[in-house]
Image (tube, grey):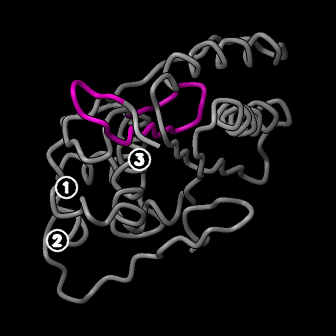
Amino acid sequence: MKQKYGNLEVEMLLTLDLATVLGFTVGPISDRKFMSGHFRLPSTGPDIGRFAAAYEDWLHSKLLNVTSCCFEAPILAGKTQLMTVRKLCGLAYHTELMCTQMSIECREAHLQSVKKAIGGHGRAQKSDMIRAVQSYGYEVTEENEADAIAVRLYTIMTRHREYAADFKLDLGLLGTVPKQPTRIPIPERRASQLLGPED
């Protein structure tokens, strides 16, 4: 399904880094000049309903005219507080629900797969991801926005390879030719709709 963008019909992609500070990109899949940014959800303490309502309002505005969405799968450390778990998993659940209701294809990408493809290795830190995204020509300093851009580049690299050269993704990690060919995991369509296996 395509949406009107000016006089053209194009596929519109939304990518998300889900957290209290949301990172996002939105725009035509083939366009390097997509919109990106970050948005802070309100601090609601144990009030999950108000947190979810704020996210729903924000997400609805971003999903308008979008044809596909990809978000970074939540990663929960062993000692993550229950309230944080509920909020993070709730953001993922709510994203898939709203995409289904609006007939938008929705996928999630494993954090380690994105880090490996864009940052060079699965243990890349936030600062590494910011530098990696900057090396592709994007002037970004906010870590959540950088993660959302990385998810977008990973989605193009694995699901829309016809545009990879336009984004210099065909040149290998960090936009340069690697010494050894790099194996990027190509997603298979599975029930969970994950964009790549856990590395």
Q: Nearer the viewer, mark 1 or mark 3?
A: 1
Q: Give the percent coordinates (x, y) of residue 97.
A: 74, 34
- Badge 1 element: helix
Residue 78 image-quadrant placement: bottom right
Q: Give the percent coordinates (x, y) of residue 195.
A: 55, 62
Look at label 1 and name its amino acid.
Phe
- Badge 2 element: helix
Residue at point 55%, 48% (across, down): 72
Q: Which residue is mark 2?
A: 171
Q: Which residue is mark 1?
A: 167
> Is residue 9 shown above or below 118?
above
Task: Please identify the quadrant where the C terminus is shown.
Answer: bottom right
Residue 89 image-quadrant placement: top right
Compared across the picture, whether 129 is left or right of 189 comes to: left
Q: Which residue is mark 3?
A: 126
The crowding category of the residue bearing disc 2, from other C-alpha atoms within 10 Å (few below 14, some 14 to 19, many at least 20), is: few
* Magenta stretch contains residue 6: yes
- Badge 3 element: helix
Residue 96 image-quadrant placement: top right
Label whose residue precedes the other's in the sequence (2 or 3):
3
Q: Nearer the viewer, residue 167 or 47?
A: 167
Image: magenta residue range: 4-25
Compared across the picture, whether 56 is left or right of 158 comes to: right
Residue at point 50%, 38% (across, down): 16
Q: CA distance from mark 1 to mark 2?
A: 9 Å
